Each structure stands twice: as C-alpha cells, then as structure tokens.
C-alpha cells in the first residue's frame, strides 16, 4: 500500500462515518498521511482526527476511535493505533496475507460473505403500516437483521395487501409492542407499482432512498443505462459472469495470486473489505438504503477497475497470472453484488 492508497483509505473511512451519522463534519478534499517520526509508532501517521474534532464537536480521540473502527482490517493495513491527543498511526501489512485472507473469505462464504452473528440472540420485533413502502422496508430490514443472527418478527398494522406477496413480502399479524418502520409512503399501491415497474425495480425504488426521503418511482427505474443505479449494479454483476465465461473460452480460470496493482484495484478491495461493516450498519440502523448505496459504490469501482486493468487478455496478450488475479478480484465483487441484491430482495441475473 502506497501513501496515496492509505490516504484514500482513510478518506473513505471519514466519508463512511459521515454517511452513517457517526461523525457530523465536512468531508475533507484529501487526508494527509506522513511517515512516522523517529520514536513514533507504526509506518505512517495522520492528524485528520484533530482536524475534524472541532467541526464534529467531539474530542480528537473520539474522532480517532470512530475512524479506527472503519480503517482497521482494510487490505494492506495490519494495525491502527491512537497516540497522543488523537493521532492515528498505521502499521502496514507487508505481506499478501490481508489480500489473500479477504479473497479466501469471499470465495468460501459466497453470497453470505458479510453475514455475521453481531445480533445473535436478539429478538427484534418490527411493525409497519398497511402501505407498500413500509411493508417492503420492514421486509428488507428483517432480512438484514437475520443475516446478522437476529430472530425477527414483522407485524402489519392492518390487513396485508395480497399484492405484497409478489414483492416477496409476507404479511403477519399486528404486533403493538414492536418498533415501528415508518418511511415516507410511496403514494401508490403495490399492484400499481408492479404493473408499471415489476418487482425488482419496485423494490429498488422503494429501498434506495433513505426512509425520510420521498421515493422516486418513475420510468427511469427501467432505463438500461448507467444513470439508473439499479441497472448499474445488475450490469456490473452480469459483466462478471461474462468475464468468467470469456476466460473459460480462453482456457483459464481465476486465481487470487498477487494483489492487483493500481488505485482502482485498491479502491475496489477496500469496498469489498468494508462489506461486512456495511451490512451490519444497515441492519443496526434499520436502513437498507445504506446497503443499496454500498452496492452502487462496488459496481462503479468494479467497472472502473475493469476499464483500466482488463481481467481478459487484450489484443495479442496471452492469459497470465495477472489476468487470473484480476479475474479473481472481479468475481469477488460479483459475489458481493449478488449477495447484497439478495438481501434487498432483488434478483441478480447473469445476463441483462
């Protein structure tokens, strides 16, 4: 990991903390990291927590703790420590172990990569109005919570709409003791939305905006272009399958091998490493929109990586270890996209 890569990793941690409302401060244009001075700890240090402490109305050490949680475990980083009033000190992982461990976890766990037991033993009870957006949001929150080990019961304040079943939503009886799921209503019935958009675009349109925002449910959800975030995510997923098929025709398969070089590869790796934390945050905050935004970021990073470092040979190139490693990274991203879409109740077709 280069200093520039480390700077981007810390900057992404700041942005994530702000997105999750753990940190209320403006996101800086860049984060400065420096070689640790003699007698200091780690390989690099940053004073970003001191810079953000004032705007965040927190102590620098509190800011540093928030950022340490989001940087620790990123590919290439072995250890993160806090020293002095709130300096972040980074010890880099000098081996390929971090990259190899990440790729192994994704390959072994498949679409369940990022599922965990942080909520194991919890019985979570949710209630929603007899309205399509509330029903779909409660269903997605339940899926996210179950993926973190919780037991979940979801009740409906009224008679369930039979059209919800076509959106993958089961309507249970009323539960007055439950936590209420109350997003801004959709302004349309499930049947109307299904006729116009179909189940996948309907669910994405209802879940992608934050619950306190209105859900845009126009025909742009069906546009086959990168301006449509749902198409972008599903296209990136299908592109991975096309790459795997193309590699098979050329007689090679993926192999993690050496970590792919380049800023685009590091950006994608960081997002894949962040996936478990993104799932847990979405579950804890009852916010499936966080997962949707994360999947968008993974899709864009995957396509950027593909554009600058093709997993398939180009022109007169022959398949090499570099191509096998790039293909492995792309396939890991495809696995994350498929698993994330599944938790939102949306299909991930191999072909679009």
Image (tube, rainbow, N blue to C red):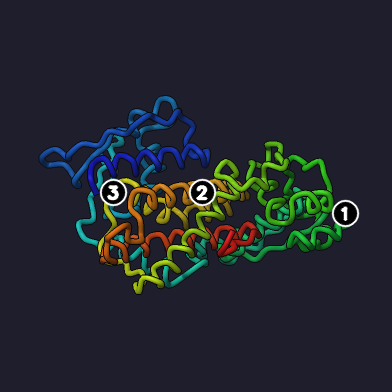
The answer to whether the residues at label 2 and label 3 have Cβ atoms under 8 Å apart is no
Q: Farthest residue in the top direction?
A: 54
Q: Where is residue 103 in the image (x, y as percent from the top left)?
A: 36, 65
Element at label 3: loop
Q: The C terminus lies in which quarter of the figure?
A: bottom right
* Residue at x 68%, y 63% (from the top left corner): 152
- Sequence order check, earlier mark of 2 and 1: 1
- When the figure is inspected, residue 159 is found, relative to residue 85, above or below; the finding is below
Residue ID for mark 2? 294
Residue ID for mark 3? 262
Determine the CA span between mark 3 and mark 1. Answer: 54 Å
Q: Count neighbours of disc 1 (C-alpha within 10 A) and say few if under 14, some if 14 to 19, many if 20 or more.
A: some
- Sequence order check, earlier mark of 3 and 1: 1
Residue ID for mark 1? 158
Q: Farthest residue in the front direction?
A: 316
Q: Position of residue 251 (x, y in %)?
A: 35, 74
Q: Count neighbours of disc 2 (C-alpha within 10 A) and say few if under 14, some if 14 to 19, many if 20 or more.
A: many
Q: Farthest residue in the left direction?
A: 38
- Is 186 left, or right, of 95 in this rendering? right
Element at label 2: helix
Q: Farthest residue in the right direction?
A: 159
Quarter assignment of residue 61: top left
Quarter assignment of residue 60: top left
Q: Where is residue 339 in the image (x, y as percent from the top left)?
A: 54, 62
Determine the CA span between mark 2 and mark 3. Answer: 21 Å
Q: Where is residue 5 in the image (x, y as percent from the top left)?
A: 28, 44
Q: Which mark is residue 74?
A: none
Determine the CA span between mark 2 and mark 1. Answer: 33 Å
């Amino acid at each position: 990991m280069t200093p520039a890569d480390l700077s981007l990793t810390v900057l992404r941690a700041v942005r994530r903390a702000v997105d999750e409302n753990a940190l209320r401060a403006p996101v800086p244009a860049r984060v400065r990291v420096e070689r640790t001075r003699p007698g200091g700890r780690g390989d690099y240090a940053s004073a970003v927590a001191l810079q953000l402490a004032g705007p965040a109305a927190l102590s620098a050490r509190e800011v540093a703790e928030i950022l340490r949680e989001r940087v620790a475990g990123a590919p290439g980083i072995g250890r993160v420590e806090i020293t002095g009033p709130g300096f972040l000190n980074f010890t880099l992982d000098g081996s390929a172990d971090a990259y190899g461990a990440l790729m192994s976890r994704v390959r072994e766990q498949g679409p369940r990569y990022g599922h965990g037991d942080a909520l194991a033993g919890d019985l979570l009870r949710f209630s929603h109005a007899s309205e399509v957006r509330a029903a779909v949001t409660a269903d997605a929150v339940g899926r996210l919570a179950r993926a973190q080990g919780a037991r979940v019961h979801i009740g409906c304040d009224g008679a369930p709409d039979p059209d919800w079943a076509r959106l993958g939503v089961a309507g249970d009886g009323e539960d007055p003791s439950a936590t209420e799921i109350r997003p801004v209503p959709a302004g349309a019935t499930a049947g109307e939305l299904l006729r116009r958009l179909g189940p996948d675009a309907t669910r994405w349109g209802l879940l992608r905006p934050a619950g306190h925002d209105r859900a845009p449910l126009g025909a742009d959800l069906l546009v086959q272009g990168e301006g449509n975030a749902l198409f972008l995510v599903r296209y990136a997923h299908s592109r991975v399958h096309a790459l795997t098929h193309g590699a098979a025709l050329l007689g090679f398969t993926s192999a993690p091998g050496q970590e792919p070089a380049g800023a685009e590869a590091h950006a994608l790796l960081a997002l894949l490493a962040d996936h478990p934390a993104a799932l847990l945050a979405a579950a804890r905050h009852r916010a499936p929109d966080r997962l949707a935004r994360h999947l968008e970021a993974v899709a864009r990073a995957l396509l950027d990586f593909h554009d600058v470092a093709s997993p398939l040979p180009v022109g007169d190139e022959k398949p090499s270890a570099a191509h096998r490693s790039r293909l492995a990274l792309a396939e890991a991203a495809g696995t994350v996209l498929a698993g994330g879409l599944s938790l939102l109740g949306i299909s991930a077709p191999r072909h679009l």
